[in-house]
Image (spheres, rainbow, N blue to C red):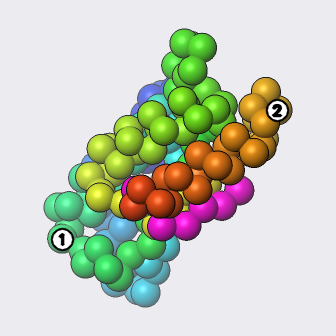
């Protein structure tokens, strides 16, 4: 959550790539293999920095569980937030690009979005699993 310095973390001061690499390396060397982030953390910078750190460190992908989430406000456009099919499909592709990964191990709904029927969100998540972009879903 503290990777990057956009949005909320612009004021609070988030971690840069050097610090992210050091933290991920330190954790992995001690057996931590589950890494959780979200698209809204530093408006995508958290995912970007994590992806860069994983690539630079050359950590074995099959030994990592990478989780990310979607729901929050990514922009002020009508589809820039929530759990609509449109938003989730776009955000998973954006998260994959930022993370530099071919799939996300655990893709989660980041809270409730009362304007979208839960069935729509769950059907979209199921389609993401079937497409191979996501392995497991959560909420």
**Residue most extreme to the top:** 77
Q: Residue at x 48, y 38 (%)?
A: 89
Q: Is residue 116 left or right of residue 76?
A: right
Q: Quadrant of residue 115?
A: top right
* Contact (Cβ within 8 Å) of mark 2 with mark 1: no
Is residue 27 visible in the rendered image? The answer is no
Depth check, front residue: 109 or 32: 109
- The tag on residue 114 is 2
Q: Position of residue 28 (x, y in %)?
A: 37, 79
Q: Residue at x 29, y 58 (%)?
A: 102
Asked if residue 115 is among those painted magenta in the image, a careful observer would answer no
Residue at image point 25% right, 78% down = 60
Pinpoint residue 137: horizontal percent, then vertical percent.
60, 61
Part of the protein shown in magenta: 133-139
Looking at the rendered structure, the secondary structure element under dot 2 is loop
Element type at mark 1? loop
Mark 2 vs mark 1, foreground winner is 2
What is the x, y in percent for residue 6? 45, 29
Compare residues 53 and 120 and report the one nearer the observer.
120
Q: Position of residue 29 (x, y in %)?
A: 34, 84
Lower position in the chain sequence, tag 2 or tag 1: 1
The answer to whether residue 13 is above or below residue 25 is above
| Residue 137 is one of the magenta-drawn residues | yes
| Residue 58: numbered disc | 1
In the image, 62 versus 136, the foreground residue is 136
Residue 71 visible, this orientation? yes
Corner quadrant of residue 12: top right
- Location of residue 18 with respect to 48 vertically, above or below: below
What secondary structure do most residues of the magenta stretch adopt?
strand
Few, some or many C-alpha atoms within 10 Å of disc 2 (few <14, some 14-19, many ≥20)? few
């Amino acid at each position: 959550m503290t990777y990057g310095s956009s949005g909320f973390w612009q004021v609070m001061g988030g971690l840069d790539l050097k610090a992210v690499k050091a933290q991920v390396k330190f954790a992995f060397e001690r057996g931590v293999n589950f890494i959780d982030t979200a698209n809204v953390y530093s408006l995508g910078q958290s995912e970007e920095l994590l992806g860069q750190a994983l690539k630079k460190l050359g950590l074995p992908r099959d030994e990592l569980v990478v989780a990310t989430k979607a729901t929050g406000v990514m922009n002020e456009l009508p589809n820039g937030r929530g759990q609509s099919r449109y938003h989730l499909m776009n955000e998973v592709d954006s998260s994959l690009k930022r993370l530099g990964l071919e799939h996300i191990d655990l893709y989660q709904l980041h809270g409730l979005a009362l304007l979208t029927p839960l069935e729509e969100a769950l059907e979209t998540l199921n389609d993401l699993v079937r497409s191979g972009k996501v392995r497991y879903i959560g909420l």
